[in-house]
Image: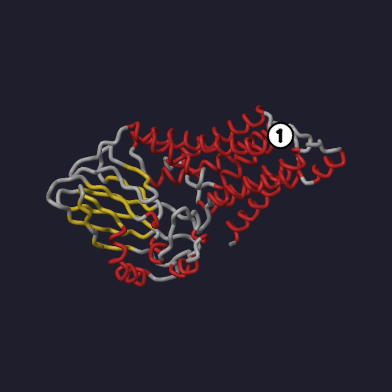
Amino acid sequence: MPKPNAAQKDRFMQFRPLNQFGRILALILGLSMAAGHTTAHEVRPAVADVAVGGAAVDLTIRLTLEPILTGMDLTGLADTNESPLADRYDALRSEDPAKLTADLTAAWPDLAPRITIKSGETVVLAQIVSLTVPEVGDISLPRDSILVLRADLPPDGSPVQIGWDQAFGSLIVRQAGDDPNAYAAILSNGSLSDPLPRDAVAPDSAGSVFARYIVSGFEHIVPKGLDHILFVLGLFFFSLRLRPLLLQVTAFTLAHTVTLALASLKIVTVPAEIVEPLIAASIVYVAVENILGGRIGALRIAVVFCFGLLHGLGFASVLGDVGLQDNRFVIGLIGFNIGVELGQLAVITLAFLLLGLPFGQKPWYRARVTIPASTLIALIGAWWTIERVFL
């Protein structure tokens, strides 16, 4: 096969930028399809406190009721605006409590079988004890209703498992009681809790808590945290050299670890309507600085550290929802943080394999990869900033 001449090589190189830009789009937009960002329409996990007695089980569930009443499928969604039923959901947020209560009562025969309460091999149906729906307030924010259910159990003394349809979204199950070893887990994709014994606490080892929260931390980045993903990519595109990347990631990690702990312990509380626009703005900042260029220095590290403090506040919502007992909090916090770090490393590794490794040593890498990628990241971050402040 004849080798291409110089003119052919020149014509070929004219199209190489399209190749690199295609990879950039594949990386960023591909992650966009798999992840979501937090907005006023965010999909949050429901929290179920479960009290298992000898003859019955009681569930007190804090949930956003409107998506369930619309028939919205929350599987894989981070934002209700992604659903074709978003308009119906938004309309229900304006409905008064009496209307939502009536809607739930009418829909309950169809909804009850989708809430799994399993005693041994026997599946039992729950009945509504009460529903508390807040009055209509700021309809730009989800409202949390409290649904209390009860189900009678067979007299065989078998332990109870709890879960619900994956279309309802994630479910945090916490075994009620004062025992420091009380079971707590985040369930997704329709999975069931561990068997919860009657009139006792389910055994829940420190190792199992640690492993669960590693998984939860990883999932909070990939696939659920596109805003955090884009920030990490902003750090990656600053420089392919190890020292700048290591300094930035270390500063970011130390910072979000601090605020993750403080916010989870309720020592520091900052409203999401403040934190989320600032996180979006942090994405814009690092991307624009990448475009302008510069060397790693104290200012860049300080800025990344400050933005890491913001991202830690964003991470804290998961641990705050679970409400781990004091003696398990440190284990859960460490596991969750390790999961977050593994998620960040996965993002950096993917970016390096897709872009850095094949193109990083090319003289045109900055012009054809770093600047287009950072521009795209900056535009996404700018839109989120506007959306979270004004829309």
Q: Residue at x 27, y 45 (%)?
A: 175
Q: Residue at x 64, y 52 (%)?
A: 380
Q: Quadrant of residue 348?
A: top right
Q: Is residue 228 left or right of residue 240?
A: left
Q: Is residue 221 left or right of residue 57?
A: right
Q: Nearer the viewer, residue 79 or 282?
A: 79
Q: Callout 1: 10 Å neighbours few (<14), some, many (20+)?
A: some
Q: Quadrant of residue 179?
A: top left
x, y (%) of residue 159? 20, 45
- Quadrant of the frame with the N terminus: top right
x, y (%) of residue 85? 47, 66
Q: Nearer the viewer, residue 27 or 104?
A: 27
- Quadrant of the frame with the C terminus: bottom right
Helix, strand or loop at mark 1: loop
Q: Is residue 303 left or right of residue 154?
A: right
**Amino acid found under the numbered disc labelled 1:** Gly
Outermost residue on the left side: it is 155
x, y (%) of residue 106? 31, 71
Q: Which residue position holds label 1?
A: 360
Give the colour scheme of this rendering: secondary structure
